[in-house]
Image (tube, grey):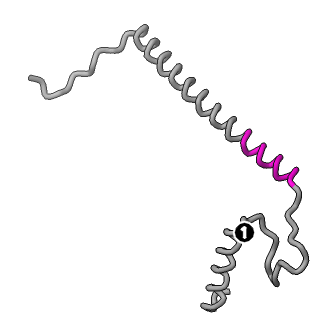
Amino acid sequence: MSLFKRNPPPEDTTARLERLEIAMRRLEEDWTEVYGKFRTLQMRVAKQVQRAEQAPEVVPPEGQAGEGETATSLSPRARLIQEQILARRRANGGG
């Protein structure tokens, strides 16, 4: 038994080429999948931006927005919860 490890025999050029081609095809498939997901996501974002630009601005009727408050697009329930949170913060000296 030898103290030195034997190097594996060199890979056949044809086998190496086939292995590399398979690896390249897998990479191309992965890239195509990732690119498709990116395009879908990009189209969704573009659609959201377009909807936001076309939507009319939400302006509260006069006297509804208190001092320092801004108009929001929150639902009535979410607005109530937000007001409760802000009231607690003011009561605790955080506001």
- The outermost residue toward the front is 76
Residue shown at 86%/71% (left/top)? 60
- Give the farthest residue toward the right: 62
On the image, the x and y values in percent for residue 11 come to 36, 14
**Viewer-closest of 27 and 68:** 68
Give left or right: position of 22 versus 87: left
Residue bearing the label numbered 1: 76
Query: With respect to residue 49, does 60 lie above or below?
Result: below
Q: Residue at x 48, y 21 (%)?
A: 23
Q: Position of residue 77 (x, y in %)?
A: 67, 69
- The quarter of the rendered structure image containing the C terminus is bottom right
> Which quadrant would the N terminus be assigned to in this image?
top left
Stretch of the chain drawn in magenta: 43-55
Give residue 88's quadrant in the image. bottom right
Within-10-Å neighbours for mark 1: few <14, some 14–19, many 20+: few
At a point 68% along the width and 75% down the height, the residue shown is: 80
68 in relation to 41, above or below: below
Residue 91 picture location, percent across and down: 63, 91
Q: Is 47 included in the stretch rendered in magenta? A: yes
Vertical comparison of 34 with 59: above or below: above
Identity, as a three-letter code, of the amino acid under mark 1: Pro
Our reading of the magenta stretch's main secondary structure is: helix
**Is residue 19 found left or right of 68 in the rendered image?**
left
